[in-house]
Amino acid sequence: PQRDSEVGIFQQYLNADVKLEPYSNMNTWVANGWDVPGILNWMLAKGIMAFNTKNLFKPPDSVIPAFIEFIRRMGYRHVLRSLEHDQTITVGASSNFKLQWKNAGVAVSHYGHLVALKFSKANGPEYIAKGLEANFLPGDSLHTQVVTLPNYLSAGHYTVNVGVIEPNTRDAEVKMAITGRDSKGWYPVSTIEVINSAPVFSPLKFPSVGIY
């Protein structure tokens, strides 16, 4: 503990990834009678993001349950617990979307990914609303995203998809720790009725013109 305080390791996971390469490997730990679950829990307490197993692909049988639990909790794991919003939204007007998140891991993402909401309609237009950075601390957090839909969205029934995206490409490349991920990485979690009272214009059509 004293050495931890000297290097400030307790809070390092807030600023950068914590990657640990422990002495030897778990075979040696078990052979020496060391407290393997205690060692793994110590690393979790430091917000570990990555762990070098030193080519040990299968730990000793006696510590496999503890190692599986360690792997399950290591890093960050975005869990969307709930999404609340109005049943309808009018284009051009602002509306609040409340997202309850849980980071079920022990680390924080430092990769600049953003929370995003995608409004999609079968055979229709779609819109992606970018939100805040997905750098949630371990535990629960509430995020309210204010969305204003553009006028080009036609009225109708839309699916509300949640994703964690790369901000430049807008690709939903981060897999969240919930079910329902579609082929493009988005999670359809709700529906909403979009209201657009503006007239819909059809493309102009001109009579054919002969060439003389």
Image (tube, helix red, strand yellow):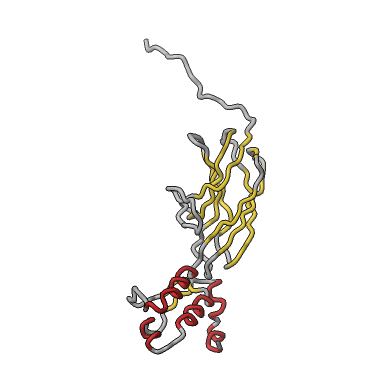
In what quadrant of the picture does the C terminus appear?
top left
Rendered residue at 42%/48% (across/down): 183
Q: Is residue 26 left or right of residue 144?
A: left
Residue 75 visible in the snapshot: yes
Rendered residue at 57%/68% (across/down): 138
> Which residue reaches farthest left?
55
In what quadrant of the picture does the N terminus appear?
bottom right
Q: Is residue 37 above or below residue 144?
A: below
Residue 170 visible in the snapshot: no
Q: Is residue 95 above or below residue 12?
A: above
Question: How many numbered discs sit on the rendered protein?
Answer: 0
Q: Position of residue 48 (x, y in %)?
A: 49, 74
Rendered residue at 61%/37% (across/down): 194
Q: Position of residue 181 (x, y in %)?
A: 47, 51
Q: Position of residue 143 (x, y in %)?
A: 63, 57
Q: Is residue 83 left or right of residue 25?
A: right
Q: Is residue 77 above or below residue 53?
A: above
Rendered residue at 44%/87% (across/down): 34
Who is closer to the viewer here, 38 or 193? 38
> Which residue reaches farthest front?
62
Q: Position of residue 203 (x, y in %)?
A: 50, 24
